[in-house]
Amino acid sequence: MRVLARLVPALALVAAAPAATPPPPRGFFPDAAVEQQKVEREFRAIPDPAVARENMRRLSAVPHHLGSPGGRDNAEYIRTRFKMYGLDARVETFDVLFPTPKERVVELVEPVKFRAALAEPVLRDDPTSNQTALQLPTYNAYSVDGDVTAPLVYVNFGVPDDYEKLERLGVDVKGKIVIARYGGGWRGIKPKVAAEKGAVGCIIYSDPKDDGYFEGETYPKGPFRPDQGVQRGSVADMPVYSGDPLTPGVGATKDARRLERSEAKTITKIPVLPISYGDAKPLLAALEGPVAPESWRGALPITYRVGPGPAKVHLKLTFDWKLVPANDVVAIIPGSTWPDEWIVRGNHHDAWVNGAEDPISGLVAMLEEARAYGMLLEKGWRPKRTIVLCAWDGEEQGLLGSTEWAETHAEELRTKGVAYINTDGNDRGFFNAGGSHTLEPLVSTSLTEVEDPEKKISVLSRAKLKQIADADKPEDKQKARDRAALLRIEALGSGSDFTPFLQHIGMASLNLGFAGESDGGIYHSIYDDFTWYTRFSDTDFTYARALAQSAGTMTLRLANADILPLDFSTAAEAIARYVKEVGDLADTKRRENEETNRQLDENLPWAVADPKKPFVAPKRETPVPHFDFSPLQNASDALTVAAAAYTKAFDAAFAAGAPPIDAQRQKALNAVLRDFERSLTSEKGLPGRPWYRHLVYAPGAYTGYGVKTLPAVREALEQKRWDDVNPAAAETAAAIEKAAAEVREATKLLGS
Ligand SMILES: [Zn+2]
């Protein structure tokens, strides 16, 4: 803490503007630091909101999903831009499985007849909403084909907790079609859990409480989801592996060995389709049975009931299962000094439909970074490390373009990959960063250099103050404040293209963007377009500029630093926090189970239940054993000690008059630093999902996007696999020990 606080000594949280004399960037020797600051200043002056706006208009002009003419055309446009900027760019193509709907039917057959429209209306106020022939229909990619008719059950978000509540209500979904609302976890979890519980079909709808009229005025009057608006999206079981369902672990090249579709673990077991709240209302209104628990009720003007029935639904889906080309656009700026150390920067270019917000708002920032690099190159500047700029295809279907590229180049990335910086949709508001905690100081110090377009204070100051404002308890607010100049970055689960780099390859990664002041309800609909974006989000594209300045500054520092600006104290701090959390989780589970059993002994559940309402008593729980977390605690302590020693040696190496570190030693040291993140991965991967190798960060098997830190340990506890806890703790501890050894090695290289 004390050491961290020294990183940016001059920063006052309420500073009126970015500091006049910014601290030297981390990891640069004095001469290089002066040069770096000059290059950065030039770089940050280049990104231009007008260019970002024009690129968005062009790139969102027509639907441009995976495999579409618009997508192909956009890839070509991006390649041409990169070339125009003087960068060496090409399109790298993979062949990926991409089902599109042939037939979609949702109808209520009992007690009354109703057929769902399954279409988003053209709006006169929205000039691209009428490109119907080019738009993908509303559907969930990687739903299996199916034709089922069954009574309906409302399952709230459709996550495991919801099914426990249903059990208490005496409701079983076996043989039923479930209807779940969006939210509460990643959409792909809903059909996965429904199938595990025996359901035969799954419908997902957008409740107005989530992003419709409950939140604000609906589109086109306001930004929120209209009556017939639908959220498309992938339902592949991404927590098992991301990318093409037919080629797990290998690039989907022309001659790759492909699974049969029936063998692909990430395709759903039951048919699933998303619908609007306009279409959902008659289905939900026809349900009887128990009134839904209060927290399950949305904002439709009905009494939410659980069912089953008498509503009976017919769900029929057939798809055209074809291979389509995924076109990644890759530009390379070769490094002058260490060409075999790569900084990879990416944003996807494909969308579900026109996708102005998701993903073009992030892509236009990356294109401005590319243009700025081009201008610097023209003046003779070269990065010391290689910068690889990637515009990914097929992100929306399950990170296809990025995953297939990372798998194809896995060997190279494992030896050359230093860091991956991702962006995706960008909006107005506060800077958010997720990622590897070794990069926390890099993120914060870079953000002192960028001005918030609205408040004219530094992006860091605004983001920090927002974190303090958002912390629940006064002590948490104080904790956020105590971290002085450091913005806390969140651990990453999944949901964008960082996943293959961070969790499969083991590269230090970041996911960056502004958000918080332009909510809406157009996500994955035909209304996510230029009209919506320029009316309701970053309307003057100043946040596109700020994102380019932020991500670009971080990229430039990683590319040019003499010693990579990774910090291990911040990583050790995060890991220590996670170790404490899993220990606390075990204790909480133990107390909860004891309490449940005590209540059963007292006959409490029966006594307090209303006899006129359905009631099923909870099952008796097995007592939670005591676990051995000492290997984890020892490893975490070892890392903390090693990190403190490294920070001390690092500060000494950059102190005035310190002896220089020769090129040979720099190279060796940087290699060790780069390997830190990799040492937190395991060759055999996580239990049941070997594609995921990171032992500190993973998407939850039952949360999807939501992160599970120390996943092997935490998920064994959450899933009550008690026998797996100690081995998982030992394995995770061994990786942390290995990481601590890397840090000690790095300290040695710094100090000698
Ligand atoms: Zn996206």
Image: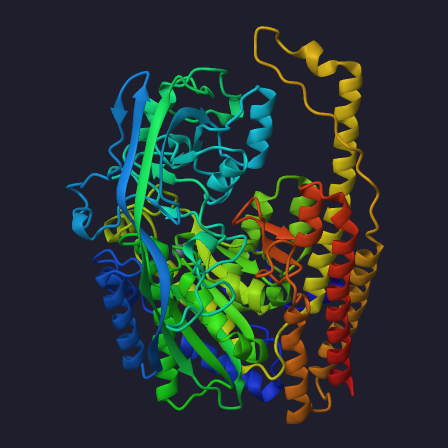
Is residue 635 left or right of 568 when viewed as pictured?
right
In the picture shown, does residue 624 fall above or below 411? Answer: above
In the picture shown, does residue 49 fall above or below 131? Answer: below
- The answer to whether one can see residue 448 in this image is no
Residue 668 placement (x, y as % from top left) = 67, 86
Q: Nearer the viewer, residue 642 or 297?
A: 297
Quadrant location of the N terminus in the rendered image:
bottom right
Image quadrant where residue 364 sits: bottom left
Picture quadrant of ligand 1: bottom left
What residue is at 57 percent from the left and 36 percent from the top? 160
What residue is at 36 percent from the left and 22 percent from the top? 312
Residue 37 placement (x, y as % from top left) = 51, 79
Is residue 129 left or right of 449 when viewed as pictured?
left
Quadrant location of the C terminus in the rendered image:
bottom right
Image quadrant where residue 257 sits: bottom left
Image quadrant where residue 116 sits: top left
- The answer to whether one can see residue 563 in this image is yes
What residue is at 68 percent from the left and 70 percent from the top? 679
How many numbered marks have been drawn onto this rendered protein structure? 0
Colour pattern of the rendering: rainbow
Q: Nearer the viewer, residue 752 or 339?
A: 339
Residue 152 placement (x, y as % from top left) = 41, 25
Q: Nearer the viewer, residue 481 or 412?
A: 412
In the picture shown, does residue 589 fall above or below 608? Answer: below
Residue 58 placement (x, y as % from top left) = 22, 63
In the picture shown, does residue 266 fall above or below 167? Answer: below
